[in-house]
Structures are given as C-alpha cells and as structure tokens.
Amino acid sequence: MGLPFQCLSRLGRGALFCAAKGCSIRTFDLSANSQPLFSWTHPSSRQAEDANQTGETHKALEDEEQAEQQPPSKRRKLGSDDAESNVGTDDMQGLPDTPANGKKSQKTNKAKWTPAKPELPFVILLTATEDGSHVIAVTGQDKTLWVFEHDGKGSLNELSQRAMPKRPCSLALTADGQTILSADKFGDVYALPLIPHPEVSPVPTPAPYPLSHCAGPTSSRYTHSATDGHLKISNASERLMRSGTCQKKGPSLRTRPYIVTADRDEHIRVSRGIPQSHIIETYCLGHTSFVTALCNPRSRPDILISGGGDNELFVWDWLAGKLLGTVDLLVHVREVLPDTTKIAVIKLIAYEVQNECIVVAICERIPALFVFQLQTDNAVLYRETLRLRGNALDITSLRVAEQTLLVAVDVAGSGGEILAFERDGKGWVSRQYIQGTTDIDEEPVLSREDLDKALYTVENLRKTGHDEEGDEAPLETPEQSSETKLD
C-alpha cells in the first residue's frame, strides 16, 4: 500500500511548501510543476526494508529445508520375533527415538524464527518558521526532533537532531521563531532553542517536580514547563497553540506571551510564556471530551477556537477563560457520512480571505473539509463543505492566489494526493495538484491495516466507560445549534 502525504507546512509567504510522506519530507512550488524540488529521507528507514528482506530470506530457507526432508516410511506390521531383524534402514529413519527404559521420549518442537516487525520512523509532525527559513519535524519511532535550514528555493539542509524524553505529539514556535515548544502525551511541554548551542546537551532536562511545585524554570538552558499533576497521566494528550502575545488593558499590565495547551481530560490551560511558564493564568472549561485542535486567528488574537471529541467547535475569550459559544460540527459531518455518531477533530486553521476570517476544520476518517466564518460579533457561521475523494489528513494555507488552501488526502488504493483549493467568488474550487505515487526504492510498503494504525490515532483518545468512572459531571455549555450561541 502506497503511503499518503500525512503532514503539510508552508515555507514562508510565497508558493513554497513542504509535505511529509511516510519517512520522507519533500518540498514543492505551487506555481511550478507537481514534481518535488527536494526530498529528504530518514537515514534509518532502510533498516525496516532490510529487516523485511531478512525475514523473507529466513522463510525461504525454512521452506527449502522442509522440502528436503522426506516423509517417514510406513512401518510393516511385524511379529515380535522378527521385528528387530526385518526392520530396514528406511523404517528405522521413521521410528521415534526410544530410550533404554522403553518409554517414548517427547519431541520438542523447534521454535520457528519470526522476524519482529520494525516500527517505521514516520514523520508525525511538521512545521516551519514564519519566514520559512527553518523546518522542524518529528519522527515518532525514535522520538527525534529534526531541524532543517531552508535556502528559500526548496532545498533543506539538516542542522540538528535531538532525541526527546517522550514522543512529541504537538509543535509550536514562539513569536520570534527562535524557540521550539514541544509537547508530549505525558503532559510535559519543553522549550528548545531552534539552533542548539554546541556546548549544550541535545536532550532537554525534565523538571524535578510538577508545575505547581516549581518556583520557576529549571536551571537547564532548556526551559521546561511541566503540567500540573492531573495532566501527568499516561493517556494525556497535549496540544499546543502558537505562542503569541495579547495586550491586557490597565496601567500596571503589559504585553505578555502566553502558552495555551489542551489535553484528553477536557481542559484548556492558559499559562504565561517563557520565562514565567510555571504561572497559570486561567483555564477554559466546557469541553466534555478530549481536546486535540486549537486555533487562534491572527486577525482576532483575543479569540480561541477549539475542537476534539465533542460534537461542536467551541469559541472562547481565552484570556478571560470565558466560553462565548459553540457551533455544531456533527450535523455537517452527517451530510457527508449520514451514519456518523461521533467525530474527532484533527486540525483547525484560520486565515484571512478578502477581509473575512475563515476557519477550516478536518475530522478523522471524514472525506471533507468544513468551512466556517468568524464574524466580528464572535459568532461562527457555517459556510460550506468541500468534499474529497478520501480522508483529510492535514491542511495548511498559502499566501498566494488570495490564500490558497492545501489539503493532504488519503485516497484508498493510491499514494494519496494533495489538493489546492482557491477562492472563486464566495466559494472555493479545487484542482488536483500532486498525485502521490508509490516509490518502491524510497518507501516501505504497508498493509492497509498497518497504515490505518499509523495514520488514525486521534479517536483512540476517547475515554471508555471504565475511564470515565469517578469523573465529575460536565459543565453546562451554551445551547448547541448550527450557529454560535453567544452568552
């Protein structure tokens, strides 16, 4: 089974972007042809192929060995007097070994050699600095964070690789683009310099205590902000919003950066940015299921839109911790797949098109994009659904052709595709831009089952009945409808 493009990120303000496909990263120019400008492949991806070839070799040797062994000859029924003298050599080969006491010894079955299936070093996260000068990626199998330098023309030069303590599940960059924020599912958020100092160990140092016990960042040159105790569970899943600034009004207040995180336990936490990330400003409480997507529109920095395992998208005054309203998403998903009962939002993005703030959502295993508009009164209105030939895996926007929207699509039976949607009046039209192909020499070949396990993991965050025992009753939220209800 060919691998689809699973991650997308724009490179600067032009038509360049990069896409992850299995264990590789490729760069493209939307204004040129569909051929990649550059391709980088994980150096250890060949090991998986070698392991598979070794397994096939061992299996072939076993089959050959079994073929050479002749089946035992049938024994003739003999009398007790002449049994010993009349048994031929062939018959003796078919007899089981008999010890001196006359009892048959048990045969021990020889264990067959079974090769372990290696986990492939897939690129699971991909982002770039605002100016497109650097690309940051995470490969899941080795929990490694990679930094590449971009020459502005599509070529990437590997600068560093740093092994993280736990597998990252979300990436963001500070406003100046010089610090990487990496969150993992155990509730820890690490801050790492974009360009590591040569004298500093490449592994971040965890804080010795939960956030509530820390007086400040650790003494390590890597600033670490641990979450409070209730997030430090094995199934927690942190999601990061881009760290930015918000002007708080008042004579004693000043512009300050913030870090916003979310988790499987329905919480959205607003913390101060570095170096005061140990201080929690507020919580945004109202979700009743896991939260996996956060969106902070550039034109509306006071507004946060969130989604996850709930049927709605939530709209917040995030600095005040106030829920402004919700907008129903499930009703629009059912127009695509009528039997859908639950949804899992993968990603939310917001961008400006003709002075309108557009919000786009994608959900796991749903072949469509859902387009909304954030209005000046904070209401979120549904605009339209853009149907796809397969499941949407990632989305990003390019600042060309009045904000082009790119989406990576998992098309069954192929290597996937990347579609470009462009504004046409008040709607969007699509054109096929890149058709993925299966590169036998560069990509591993997976079964559909193994590919699904690698690509579709968000729904697994949903709690079962056993997980929810002892949980508090969910907070009341505004009435749900296809339009946002404001308080």
Image (cartoon, grey):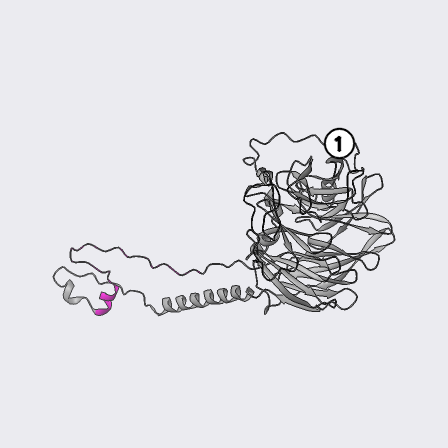
Boundaries of the magenta span: 89-114
Residue 60: % across, % down: 43, 68
Q: Is residue 156 magenta?
A: no
Q: Quadrant of residue 177?
A: bottom right
Provide residue 27's location: percent of width, then percent of height: 70, 65
For the C terminus, the image quarter is: top right
Quarter location, residue 420: bottom right
Secondary structure that dominates the magenta span? loop
Would residue 65 be seen by someone viewing this image from the given angle?
yes
Q: Is residue 379 left or right of residue 217?
A: right
Q: Residues within 10 Å of mark 1 (few under 14, many from 20)?
A: some
* SS state under label 1: loop
Q: Nearer the viewer, residue 412 or 356?
A: 356
Asked whether 401 or 343 is in front, the reply is: 401
**Mark 1 sits on what residue?**
479
Q: Amino acid at mark 1?
A: Glu
Q: Nearer the viewer, residue 11 or 6?
A: 11
Per the image, is 97 magenta? yes
Nearest the eye: 475 or 114 = 475
Which residue sits at x=66%, y=49%? 365
Q: Horizontal and vertical percent for residue 384?
A: 80, 47
Q: Quadrant of the N terminus?
A: bottom right
Q: Quadrant of residue 73?
A: bottom left
Q: Is residue 415 visible?
A: no
